[in-house]
Amino acid sequence: MISELFSPSVQHTLDIVGIFVFAISGALAAVRKNYDVFGMAVLAEVTALGGGIFRDLMIGAVPPAAFSDLGYFSTPLFATVLVFFLHPEVERINTTVNVFDAAGLGLFCVAGTVKAHDYGLGLVPSAALGLATAAGGGVLRDLLANEVPSLLRWDRDLYAVPAMVGSIMAALLIKFDALTGFTSGAAVVSAFVLRLCAMYFGWRAPRAWHRRSRATSEEEAQQAM
Amino acid sequence: MISELFSPSVQHTLDIVGIFVFAISGALAAVRKNYDVFGMAVLAEVTALGGGIFRDLMIGAVPPAAFSDLGYFSTPLFATVLVFFLHPEVERINTTVNVFDAAGLGLFCVAGTVKAHDYGLGLVPSAALGLATAAGGGVLRDLLANEVPSLLRWDRDLYAVPAMVGSIMAALLIKFDALTGFTSGAAVVSAFVLRLCAMYFGWRAPRAWHRRSRATSEEEAQQAM
Amino acid sequence: MISELFSPSVQHTLDIVGIFVFAISGALAAVRKNYDVFGMAVLAEVTALGGGIFRDLMIGAVPPAAFSDLGYFSTPLFATVLVFFLHPEVERINTTVNVFDAAGLGLFCVAGTVKAHDYGLGLVPSAALGLATAAGGGVLRDLLANEVPSLLRWDRDLYAVPAMVGSIMAALLIKFDALTGFTSGAAVVSAFVLRLCAMYFGWRAPRAWHRRSRATSEEEAQQAM
């Protein structure tokens, strides 16, 4: 079966690590919004599992894996307890958290793409759902925190592009029948390293081409600025 | 069949009452946001049916019950008409509305847990979906009103905990094969009474443990305050 | 088969046109929020396909058509590129965009109603899902832009009512077994013309009946104003 990239226990351990780190980011967002412990648990669950649940709904894999594996469900609760008692310490190792988050991003975009293709979707929609698996939880977290999704903001380091690269690599590997534990690991690492670079060098995506509008209609562009 | 807690007609009547009260809270939220009559109807429908639709999507019960029973769908429209003409009067009996809302909370968390288990989910995810059935509509209402979900806010009386207690009681009753009309009614009443107490005594859930952070790093805590 | 309103190629072309115009409105919203090019693509996809995906999830048509037809998925990306380079020009022909948007609204409310009925839903829920198909994408766009959904706001021209009229006409045509390419085209045109009139004449929906409240309790009404 194509989806067995790694041995099941390795895959499961990696999933749990990714879920744990995403959950930490959700619980921290709740602390910053001054939510209570229950709001922390909700944001941790949604951030960690939301992307995968969205993908599973789209491909008809119900009930979603998040509800059938108790480890997936309870990991965010454990992250909540940790942040509840230790949030200043967790904030202080924010860089470390971000590195693990980048690892989760790489892992989930590849795993999401492969799972969507396993359920019969084409390569392009599979890659799109891989991206949604990796980035969807963060969007739902920001919606529940009543904030503009940081994924969409111009003034944040690239997050979607690394996930897109990983998803597209996974889709190409499937297309050329070259998906193995090794090659899919390379796709994971590519997305991971790209995200680290984006954070380190402050890479950003361009906004709509203002310059052209300035050339064409000076006033309108100034008004827009 | 395990899901027949009460006679079908009693169950249906209780459902309609719960939907009606949730819809009132949705329509009132729309009035406070200065939405038009159509926005009132949308918020009424979403608040009343959103939690159940979410649960049904997760367990694969499509189309959701909200779309197959005309009574479920039309009750929020009736609530909208009522609030449209009588909203100051409805606001004035806000305490009464809150008491009925607490009853709906108790009813839906138990019924949601039982339905999820009927569809083959484990006890823990069933209880989680019971909670989502009861509280999910209110979260969607607040998202559509572009407000921080009151479920997650620290400065609101406990809402999720009573629903959690009801859901967990229902799951335990299933586990010990003790689910009857009487025992499930007891779970409903427990959640109901807990929610009433939370409102009456102003119970709140704790936020992340600020005190510890103050002890460890004085500055950081002050900055956070 | 009842859903073949027009010849498949005509239907598909109309779908693509509607998706394209909805995507333009999503990409423009992203430009106004100062999102980057990736945020533009996400908002374009969500605005154009969100309503149809919601309907397909509800009726159990997974994976949604948006994921199985590459034309549906790639059209919003093309709209994103266009807005990226030409957004001042696109803003300038805003009226034209709105006219096409009205056409998309008419088309999608009728097509959504018919598809929901094809999947076995009753006439009332089918009409509700037709409305959701046409208007749901715009609501998701506004949620992702962290704004109050313009569908629900009082101070915007009627948007939902034209879609409701089209949906209800389609449901009545199904009920009386009179659904043909011609009659369903008439339903599309009715919704389209109604929306154009709403824009031209500035039609709005009423808010909750303030006058009555003023009569009953003068103070409360003044406070509300």
Image (spheres, coloured by chain):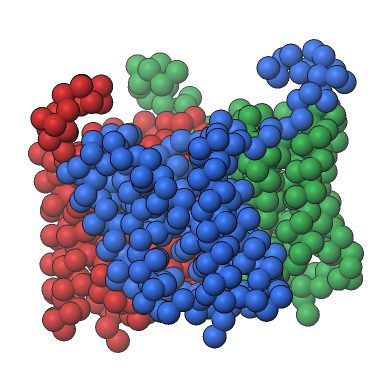
Chain colours: A green, B blue, C red
**Residue at figure coordinates x 82%, y 40% from the top left:** A82
Does any portion of residue B35 appear in the rendered image? no
**Residue at figure coordinates x 56%, y 31% from the top left:** B155
Q: How many marks?
A: 0
Quadrant of the frame with the C terminus of chain A: top left
Q: Indicate whether B183 appears above or below B34.
A: below
In the rendered structure, the answer to whether residue C207 lies left or right of residue A36 reads: left
Quarter of the image for residue C110 reads bottom left
Q: Indicate whether C187 appears above or below C7.
A: above
**Residue at figure coordinates x 25%, y 50% from the top left:** B80
Quarter of the image for residue C38 reads top right
Quadrant of the frame with the N terminus of chain A: bottom right
Residue A116 in percent (x, y) is at 65, 68
Does any portion of residue B197 appear in the rendered image? yes
In the rendered structure, the answer to whether residue A13 lies left or right of residue C45 reads: right
- The residue closer to the viewer here, C153 or B123, is B123
In the rendered structure, the answer to whether residue C68 lies left or right of residue A30 reads: left
Quarter of the image for residue A92 reads top right
**Residue at figure coordinates x 57%, y 49% from the top left:** B194
- The residue closer to the viewer here, C177 or B141, is B141
Q: Indicate whether B128 appears above or below C35.
A: below
Residue C93 in percent (x, y) is at 27, 37
Residue C221 in percent (x, y) is at 20, 26
- The residue closer to the viewer here, A51 or B175, is B175
